[in-house]
Image (tube, helix red, strand yellow):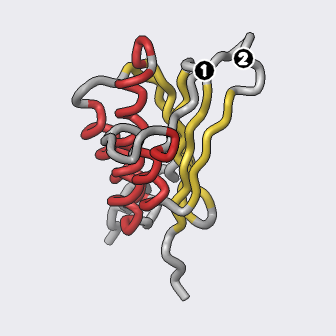
Amino acid sequence: MNHPTPAQAPPLDPSYRMSLTVGAHSARHLRQILRLLLHAWRMPELTDGAGLALTELASNVIRHVPGRRCTILIARRPEGIRVEVDDKSPRLPRTADEGSELTENNRGLLLIEGVTDRWGVARNPDPAARPGKTVWFECDALSED
């Protein structure tokens, strides 16, 4: 007797890029996309930390980037993931030590540092052609040793 063979899901791309205008409810949707990708890539243990860091970067775009436009890249790496948020604002993020210790502002990068393995920021190399910066973070998956 012949049995139907179940359809195979196409392989999941190693990266997901989206350009969007972020708003007050964007963080929830971005975390959902990130969670789905991490589960598909078999790295669900990264969901909480990476989701918190992505939320912070999206919040920074909402607060500090005129027009609130950005491009988000979520990329699978052999050892984990990398998330990049690219925007057109030339203003670099400030860390808490650049502001008063008593203020609640500028604590986001400390939060990102605490929940990711690496993070950084870079101005786009040709500001005349592409103004702005990219803020990124990486999270390493747990090894299966």
> Residue extending furthest right?
126
Residue at the image point whose x is 41% and y is 49% from the top:
53
Residue at the image point whose x is 69% and y is 26% from the top:
124
The location of residue 137, given as percent across then percent down, is 54, 50
Q: Is residue 138 above or below residue 66?
A: below
Residue count near mark 2 (Cα–Cα under 10 Å), binned few <14, some 14–19, many ≥20: few
Front residue (pair 40, 5): 40
Q: Is residue 92 left or right of residue 72?
A: right
Q: Inspect the image, locate mark 2, and give the three-letter code of the amino acid beneath it.
A: Pro
Question: Quadrant location of the C terminus?
Answer: bottom right
Give the residue pinned by disc 2. 127
Q: For mark 1, give the secondary structure.
A: loop
Q: Inspect the image, locate mark 1, and give the three-letter code of the amino acid beneath it.
A: Pro
- Using the image, tell me which numbered label, if any, was put on residue 90: 1
Residue at the image point whose x is 53% and y is 79% from the top:
143
Q: Quadrant of residue 7?
A: bottom left
Question: Quadrant location of the N terminus?
Answer: bottom left
Q: Quadrant of residue 121?
A: top right
Residue at the image point whose x is 51% and y is 40% from the top:
98
- Say which label, 1 or 2, has the lower sequence index: 1
- Residues at discs 1 and 2 in contact (Cβ within 8 Å): yes
Q: Is residue 37 left or right of residue 119?
A: left
The location of residue 16, given as percent across then percent down, is 50, 40
Front residue (pair 38, 21): 21
Q: Quadrant of residue 78?
A: bottom right
